[in-house]
Image: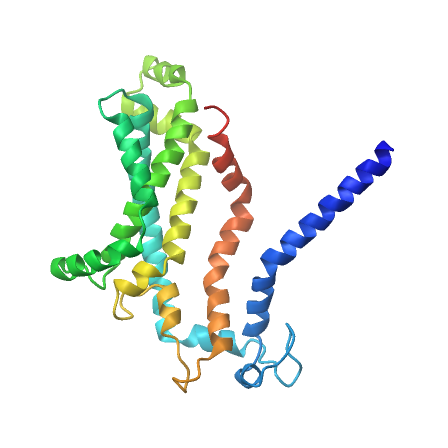
Amino acid sequence: MSTNGDLKSKALTGVGVAFILAWCLLPVVWIVSLSFKSQDAVTNGSPGFFPSSGGRAGFDNYTQVLKDDNFLLAIRNSLVVSLSATLLSVIFATLAAYAIARLEFKGKKFVLTTALVIAMFPVVSLVGPLFDMWRTFGLYDTWWGLMIPYISFTLPLAIWTLSAFFREIPWEMEQAAQVDGATAWQAFRKVIVPLAAPGVFTAAILTFFFAWNDFVFGISLTSTERARPIPAALSFFVGADPFNRPASLLAAAAVVATVPIIILVLFFQRKIVAGLTAGAVKG
């Protein structure tokens, strides 16, 4: 009976996993197949995931996308803004989380509560005020005009993630380093930060994902290709006929824009999972 029960449980688990994978991967397969179709096949309603020989464009859509100067500028903008916002957010969050975890000061709970409120604040409600402020301060349509909101919204989450890691690191390890002659800064930089590396990495990944995938700020705080990131640039992607959007080219551009995220997840999935779960071991 136990053997039959185990087989039934495994079968149900397998069916559940297969259903979840199909549900999650269906949009991915669809957009990839669309990127290999010709525009005529899309206009004529070519059925199925994969186009027939007459409607297949091969890698022509990807070639056209990668030859588009505006799209290449959007990739550059996204890389510069996302990496810069990630670096600054992680540095500030590491210092702030260490102070919250190690030091006792008045108003610490208020700081954490305020950070949580900022993280939950609706982004759309800030677009209008930021638009006016950035035009007044000369930050509209600039890299800094995007980095500042990205840092502001990712910093609270990074602080919460890192403070949990710093609380779990034994205080004695930092004291031992100082006894051996290290200064407080050296003990923090050479002992504490390496031990909290999974949390630092998780904060960096979450920040990069937010900045890379953002559309609201990208479309609202830019007006030209000078600073417009990839998600916003795709909304301006038009073909020869402005009234007939090139769906296959847009699909190819979306696939190219998704590649960095997929690479990060595949190569660093263990560290991401470790970073998200390690802080929950102790309350």
Q: Nearer the viewer, residue 153 or 204?
A: 153
How far from the left and from the top, in percent, is residue 127?
Answer: 25, 58
Colouring scheme, one of rainbow, by chain, secondary structure, one colour:
rainbow
Q: Which residue corresponds to the image point at 52% horizontal and 54% vertical from the top-left?
A: 263
Numbered marks: total: 0
Position in image of residue 58 (x %, y %): 59, 77
Q: Extreme right residue here?
A: 1
Question: Against 238, is 185 above or below?
Answer: above
Q: Residue at x 46, y 80 (%)?
A: 246
Residue 56 visible, this angle? yes
- Quadrant of residue 160 in the image? top left
Front one among 91 and 25: 25
Direction top: furthest residue: 179
Figure check: 233 above or below 15: below
Q: Is residue 264 left or right of residue 131?
A: right
* Image vertical order of residue 6 relative to residue 149, above or below: above
Residue 149, placed above or below residue 138: above
**Viewport quadrant of the N terminus:** top right
Q: In the image, residue 46 lies at what x, y percent?
A: 61, 81
Q: Nearest the camera: 176 or 48?
A: 48
Report whether 264 appears left or right of 89.
Answer: right
Q: Position of residue 265 (x, y in %)?
A: 52, 49
Q: Give the camera-side residue of 115 and 31.
A: 115
- Residue drawn at x 52%, y 83% as measured from the top left: 39
Give the residue at the far left of this rendering.
Answer: 136
Q: Quadrant of the C terminus?
A: top left
Is residue 91 visible from the viewing direction of this image?
no
